Amino acid sequence: MTLIEPLLAHYNYWITIFLMVGGVYVVVARSNMIKKLIGLGVFQTSVYLLYLSPGKILGGTPPILGSGIALYSNPLPHVLILTAIVVGVATLALGLALVVRIHESYGTIEEDDIMEVVDRDDRSE
Amino acid sequence: MRLDTILRVMSKLMIPFILVFALYVQFHGDYGPGGGFQAGVIVAAGVVLYAIIYGIEAAQRAVPKQLVEFMVPLGVLIYAAVGVWGLLLGGNYLEYNDLAHGNQPHGQERGVFWVEIGVLVTVASTMVTIFYAFAGRGRK
Amino acid sequence: MEQLINTVLLTLLAIVTIGIIRLRNLFAVVVLAGAYSFLMASVMIVLDAVDVAMTEASVGAGISTVLVLGALYLTRTEEAPPRYSASLPLIVALGTGAMLVWGTWSLPPFGMADTPMNTGVGFDYLARNYEETHIPNVVTSVLASYRGYDTLGETTVIFTAGIGVLLLLRRFQRQR
């Protein structure tokens, strides 16, 4: 047990970093815009995890006051993340609306194809 | 459209429970997990389920577009009005201590109640509005 | 036990993320993203954030999935094959990840009560809350009362996003 304890102590942070880096990779490497938005969503949820993990206290309970409970986890990150989630879906919807309009104008949602069309228009002007 | 009888019957059974659960989440939010944000999304999920099963026209007959679009700013205004209410009773903006004639815990509960109503109205109507906008666009 | 469940759920989360990164069929990606949200909600319950878990389950797995499916219906469901090699983004991502992992060594271990974060204002709210508001759920009272300005701002952001989507997608009738 002593061997894996230091690993477990930071496991939450490492998974957070993995999700964060995976999200960035999807945003940078993929040219499909809906895939980019989903990658952005993965990045966003990794930030939720980054906030919530340090607020957890082992043996604690959710911060809803009750009799006979001595130890609660930190309620502040919960408040901050709760509103962030709903704002996140609202901005995701805005991004998707932009993608739909781009598809109607250019006939594609691949960034590389759109850049080609834009370049061709620039040259013909 | 004959094969989806099970879906139609089950969703008709489930939607009332979804809406009642949303009300529970809203008004029990002081005592357990829940609140305006969650309840708003659950209400919107009920409307979205109805629209998916019965079609967007039927959903817009039950929950008219104009009503939903009217509710989007209404929620923010309710929220802001609670702040002004506190101002008029002699406190700071969004301070609830004076809302119940000097009884601080009651004033707080009153303020939180109306603020959560404002959040519910805005979140639910915004989600339904966004869904209507996507669903009503039509493939080009 | 808490730590064991936490570790298993986080590992599953990482596996689902690999699937999201690798797949090219967007429909499959959306379904995986729904599974990802439910796993994330379970992790949040283990981390004692029950309010947040409820929001993540209803928003992440419910509404966002419906919205992305709606956008897919209006566009297309297959991602084009890649044109450029993905090695440069991979190197950037791995480099960033390595530096961040290096940075975690100085962070306090998981679940400790005496970290700087867990001795600050959050526990001040816990101590004062019942006397001042009589609302047992501290998350609700901090959200709506102590940090009412924040929540007003967030509500306004949601309102603004809704207006933005309407302006982009709704076909307004021209008035002559």
Image: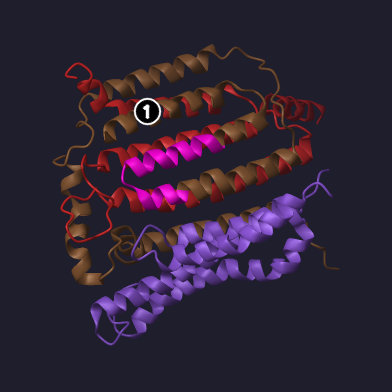
Question: Which three-letter amino acid code belongs to the residue tagged 1?
Answer: Val
Residue C44 in the magenta stretch? The answer is yes
Furthest toward the right, the residue is: C176
Q: Is residue C165 left or right of residue B84?
A: right
SS assignment at label 1: helix
Picture colour for chain C: brown
Residue B128, compared with residue C131, is above or below; it is above
Q: Name the quadrant containing residue A63.
A: bottom left
Kindly tell me whether residue B132 is visible in this rendering: no
Chain A: its colour in the image is red
Q: Is residue C143 above or below residue B77?
A: above
Query: What residue would you read off at disc 1?
Result: C8
Span colored in magenta? C34-55
Q: In the picture, residue A59 is in which quadrant?
A: top left
- The quadrant holding residue A102 is top right
Instruction: Please give the name of the residue rendered at 42% of the width and 62% of the height, measured from the top-left corner.
Output: B35
Residue positioned 76% across, 54% down in the render: B136
- Chain B drawing hue: purple
Per the picture, the main secondary structure of the magenta-coloured stretch is: helix
The residue drawn where x is 39% and y is 81% is B85
